[in-house]
Image (cartoon, rainbow, N blue to C red):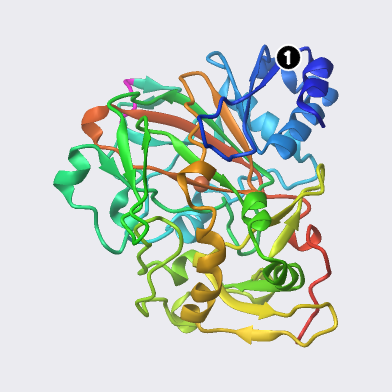
């Protein structure tokens, strides 16, 4: 849908997020004039907003200071009314036990908002005397650079240098399918001083950012940057994710540029993953098709991938790669091609904004900052999808059992 059509339909201002010279991102808009307290009364508006997110991939809805937390959850459920009414990572109990422990190094405190427990408070530092009934909470273990295998020295961090924490989509990759969209409401974040985000790898790349932002790149652009040969493999191949995938990688550390894991042989053995059921193990195609625009995204959550099934045509026997070093060697050149400043968007969300993104098309990451710069308070909500990635590929994944 062209953006002006959406604007006409909703009577809203839909504007592309301004790009600097040389920037190559082809996603991201702001919407003004929308009151999300009211939107869920109207199916047409929810549908139009949903199509806007699929089309523009990252949508910043401005001016939602007075939104009730429960209304954020209602909106999320209205985006996917056929879905079970639970956060994509499950209820708080399941989240803490299985999905929440991303890694011992990167675990973070997550608190449900009283009365709207599927809306999660995430942030850093002091959250206020009374935040919707949450009293005097200080989040000590928020987003963190600790996830990297090679640490950023503390003095360099304190001087305003940081890194992408962990590029990912929001996806349990076990039992539930990932949410189509994630919504993240900004209550508070520091806006200065400017940070210097470093790749700290052999590219020597860096880019500037205000503190407390979320970075995005588009896996539609990842796909567009692939060679014809790479595309023909990706379009016919699929990925098997580990059972309890975040437990599997709980001892692992990430690369300094935030994309992928260092191969250090620290993945847990299957027998150490706790109880799991084979029927809940996820296999997803490598390429996911945008249901509104038809665009293709190379959407492989590399850190949790345990097996690749590679083939170049629908009739070929797949070649199975079950060695994580080989898996990472296959993914790295494809996924790192887009990991350049000109393809990365850092929408400057302000207090009262809600950023919503097409989780099936994008990778995003937090970026840590020194607590001395100020507290950060955000509300995150999404919902496990009613139609998952297995139905959004270009072929049906064959059963090899
Ligand atoms: Fe996320």
Describe residue 30's horizontal placement relative to residue 246 as left or right: right
Q: Position of residue 394 (x, y in %)?
A: 82, 63
Q: Is residue 118 visible?
A: no
Displayed quadrant of residue 52: top right
Displayed quadrant of residue 228: bottom right
In the picture shown, does residue 393 fall above or below 272?
A: above
Describe residue 153's horizontal placement relative to residue 4 as left or right: left
Q: Residue at x 46, y 19 (%)?
A: 351
Q: Residue at x 46, y 38 (%)?
A: 214
Query: Per the image, is 373 magenta?
Result: no
Q: Could you say whether the residue bearing mark 1 is in a helix, strand or loop?
A: loop
| Total numbered badges shown on the rendered structure | 1
Q: Which residues are magenta?
A: 125-129
Front in this rendered view, residue 272 or 185: 185
Q: Which residue is mark 1?
A: 12
Front in this rendered view, residue 153 or 247: 153
Front in this rendered view, residue 48 or 37: 48
Q: Position of residue 359 (x, y in %)?
A: 63, 46
In the picture shown, does residue 97 fall above or below 377?
A: below
Describe residue 158's horizontal placement relative to residue 228 as left or right: left
In the picture shown, does residue 399 fall above or below 60?
A: below
Displayed quadrant of residue 292: top right
Q: Residue at x 79, y 73 (%)?
A: 397
Q: Is residue 384 visible?
A: yes
Q: Is mark 1 within 8 Å of ligand 1?
A: no
The C terminus - image quarter: bottom right
The crowding category of the residue bearing disc 1, from other C-alpha atoms within 10 Å (few below 14, some 14 to 19, many at least 20), is: some
Q: Position of residue 245 (x, y in %)?
A: 52, 68
The N terminus - image quarter: top right
Q: Residue at x 62, y 55 (%)?
A: 222
Q: Position of residue 267 (x, y in %)?
A: 42, 76
């Amino acid at each position: 849908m062209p953006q002006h059509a959406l604007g006409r339909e909703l009577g809203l201002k839909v504007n592309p997020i301004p790009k600097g010279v040389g920037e190559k991102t082809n996603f991201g808009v702001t919407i003004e004039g929308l009151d999300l307290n009211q939107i869920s009364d109207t199916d047409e508006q929810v549908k139009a907003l949903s199509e806007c997110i699929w089309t523009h991939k990252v949508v910043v809805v401005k001016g939602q200071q007075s939104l009730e937390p429960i209304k954020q959850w209602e909106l999320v459920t209205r985006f996917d009314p056929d879905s079970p009414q639970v956060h994509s990572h499950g209820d708080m109990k399941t989240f803490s036990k299985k999905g929440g422990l991303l890694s011992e190094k990167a675990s973070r405190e997550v608190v449900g908002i009283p009365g709207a427990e599927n809306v999660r408070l995430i942030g850093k530092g002091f959250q206020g005397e009374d935040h919707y009934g949450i009293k005097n909470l200080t989040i000590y273990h928020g987003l963190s650079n600790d996830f990297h295998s090679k640490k950023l020295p503390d003095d360099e961090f304190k001087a305003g240098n940081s890194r992408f924490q962990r590029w990912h989509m929001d996806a349990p990759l076990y039992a539930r399918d990932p949410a189509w969209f994630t919504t993240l409401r900004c209550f508070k974040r520091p806006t200065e001083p400017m940070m210097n985000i470093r790749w700290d790898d052999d590219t020597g790349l860096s880019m500037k950012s205000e503190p407390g932002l979320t970075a995005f790149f588009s896996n539609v652009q990842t796909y567009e940057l692939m060679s014809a040969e790479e595309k023909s493999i990706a379009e016919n191949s699929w990925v098997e994710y580990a059972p309890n995938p975040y437990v599997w990688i709980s001892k692992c550390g990430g690369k300094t540029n935030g994309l992928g894991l260092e191969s250090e042989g620290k993945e847990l053995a299957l027998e150490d993953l706790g109880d799991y059921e084979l029927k809940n193990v996820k296999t997803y195609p490598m390429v996911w098709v945008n249901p509104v625009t038809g665009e293709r995204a190379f959407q492989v959550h590399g850190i949790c991938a345990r097996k690749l099934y590679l083939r170049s045509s629908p009739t070929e026997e797949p070649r199975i790669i079950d060695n994580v070093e080989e898996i990472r060697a296959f993914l790295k050149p494809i996924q790192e091609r887009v990991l350049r400043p000109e393809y990365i968007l850092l929408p400057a969300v302000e207090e009262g904004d809600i950023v919503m993104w097409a989780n099936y098309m994008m990778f995003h990451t937090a970026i840590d900052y020194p607590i001395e710069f100020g507290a950060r308070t955000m509300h995150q909500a999404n919902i496990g999808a009613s139609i998952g990635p297995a139905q959004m590929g270009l072929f049906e994944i064959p059963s090899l059992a």
